[in-house]
Amino acid sequence: MIYIIFFIVGLSASIIGAICGVGGGVFIKPSLDAIGVLSVNSITFLSTCTVISMTGYTVISSALSSKDGNSENLIDWKLTTWLAIGSAIGGIIGKNIYTRILDLFVNKEAVGGYQAIALLISMIFVLVYTINKSKIKSYKVTNPILLMILGFILGAFSTFVGIGGGPLNLALLYYFLSMSTKVAAQNSLYLILISQIPGLVITFMNGAVPQELYQGDVGFWTMLIGMMCCGVGGGILGKKINRQISSKVVDKLFILSIICISLLCIWNAYHKLGL
């Protein structure tokens, strides 16, 4: 039964993530935290692998379609790559900070509570901005150094709280690059993919992967492979749905998702910190 729940969470999060450009980790991490059957470290690992699977499929399929002259590709490789480079570096720093903080706590679950609080605060800011973005002046930053700095800050924070960074990516792309909803969604997935890969590599290098992985735990491996498959499946379905709906619907779905994430964060902070 627990496998079914995890796979439903992984697939649903990946579909919504692919539609809105939020990656899926921002749903997977707090949702699995709320279930409370695995450690914070194991959930972060599963979430990261699922997100990389979904974003990897989406970005690669977009890149291949552009080679065929297909206009479906909306990724601004020139500008977003600078953000991605900074985000990748920030992802490494964020993962190291997370690992060091995790080692300081006797109660590892408390770290998940503090992650939930940090994520909740950021979601409130994103929600307020998204609702009022039509009234707020946006900019078109093209300076590579500034883009890398913005990406670094974004990547470090997103990796630290255990998400791909999706909602934060979108707010940044709206405000600093003046991207429209669907363009921002595709570019956000590209950012998420690049920022998450270095963090995963660092996890292996630091020996911070879940012990079940090395112990050959059949249940954990089943969960990992299943969720990665759900990530790819969610990417396929989400991309198809995104083509068929308007930008206004995507915006509404994004706002609804932020509200749901915020509620999950409140529950997780309450539960893990014993508030």
Image (cartoon, helix red, strand yellow):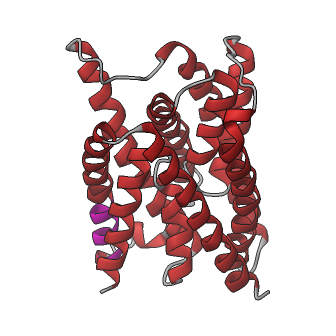
In the image: residue 30, left or right of residue 225 = right
Asked if residue 216 is positioned above or below residue 44 in the image, the reply reads below
Residue lying farthest left? 68
Look at the image and tell me whether residue 56 can be seen. Answer: yes
Q: Does 221 lie within the magenta span?
A: yes
Q: Residue at x 71, y 42 (%)?
A: 132
Q: Position of residue 145 (x, y in %)?
A: 73, 15
In the image: residue 155, left or right of residue 71 = right
* Quarter placement of the N terminus: bottom left
Asked if residue 106 is positioned above or below residue 228 in the image, the reply reads below
In the image: residue 15, left or right of residue 203 = left
Q: Position of residue 153 (x, y in %)?
A: 74, 37
Magenta stretch, main secondary structure class: helix
Q: Does 1 lie within the magenta span?
A: no
Read off the magenta span: 219-227
Asked if residue 102 is positioned above or below residue 87 in the image, the reply reads below
Q: Residue at x 65, y 66 (%)?
A: 262
Q: Position of residue 198 (x, y in %)?
A: 54, 39
Query: Which one is in front, 218 or 64?
Result: 64
In the image: residue 137, left or right of residue 224 = right
* Quarter placement of the C terminus: bottom right
Look at the image and tell me whether residue 209 can be seen. Answer: no
Q: Residue at x 33, y 37 (%)?
A: 58
Q: Residue at x 47, y 60 (%)?
A: 47
